[in-house]
Amino acid sequence: MMMLALALAAAAPQPWIGISAGPVLLRESGRPGVGSGPLVRVEVGYPVADRIAAELWLSGAMESAPPTTPGDHALLGAGGGARLLVSRLDSAGKLGLWLHAGAGWGAPVAGDGQHGPMGFGGALFTFQPFMQRFTLGLEANAVAWRSAVGMAVLPSLRCAF
């Protein structure tokens, strides 16, 4: 009976936790130049179907103002997102190309700014090494927060429970 329960648990879709971190470049309207800094996103997700997953995310970013403009920012945001598997790039299913997007609410935690909607969207390339529990990825995102838009490149690590 115990072996049957373990086999069923192994065959069921597994929830996962992931972390992505990398540089972000932001252009804020009404402000000259481009700000830059690190962005970190932590995600908890669950496969809804074979090619679709839903997730909750929490992110933090620190933006250094352009050299000619004062006013660094730090932002904390949370929201929901989804992943859609566009293509498996090999016959073993270890390489994948995903569309990844999310929307939520952000709040400044340092510097000037206002609360407001935020979101991201882009492509995610994943590789599953010899351990099926872990997935490595590289993501290119367009990011937006209120009047700022930009891009981020985020290496990621995901672990299934």
Image (cartoon, rainbow, N blue to C red):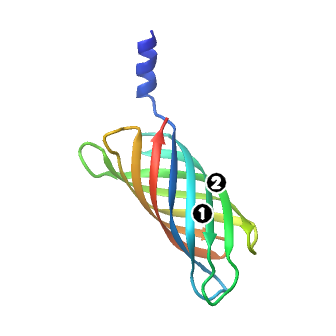
Q: Are marks 2 and 1 in contact (CB under 8 Å)?
A: yes
Identified at 57% across, 52% down, the residue is 42
Identified at 44% across, 61% down, the residue is 139
User: Which picture quadrant has residue 134?
Assistant: top left
Identified at 49% across, 45% down, the residue is 53
* Above-or-below relation of 123 to 51: below
At mark 2, the secondary structure is strand
Query: Where is residue 17 shown, x and y percent of the image?
Result: 52, 44
Q: What residue is disc 2 on?
A: 79
Q: In screen coordinates, is 99 left or right of 111? A: left
* Above-or-below relation of 27 to 133: below
The amino acid at mark 1 is: Gly
User: Which picture quadrant has residue 1?
Assistant: top left
Q: 10 Å neighbourhood of mark 1: few (<14), some, or many (≥20)? A: many
User: Which picture quadrant has residue 120?
Assistant: bottom right
Q: Which mark is residue 119?
A: 1
Identified at 68% across, 73% down, the residue is 73
Q: In the displayed orientation, state which residue is furthest to the left.
A: 91
| Mark 2 and mark 1: Cα distance apart in space | 8 Å
Q: In the displayed orientation, state which residue is furthest to the top.
A: 1
Q: Nearer the viewer, residue 50 or 147?
A: 147
Q: In screen coordinates, is 141 left or right of 78? A: left
Query: Where is residue 8 shown, x and y percent of the image?
Result: 43, 21
At mark 1, the secondary structure is strand
Query: Where is residue 30 shown, x and y percent of the image?
Result: 67, 86
* Above-or-below relation of 103 to 13: below
Q: Nearer the viewer, residue 111 or 121?
A: 111
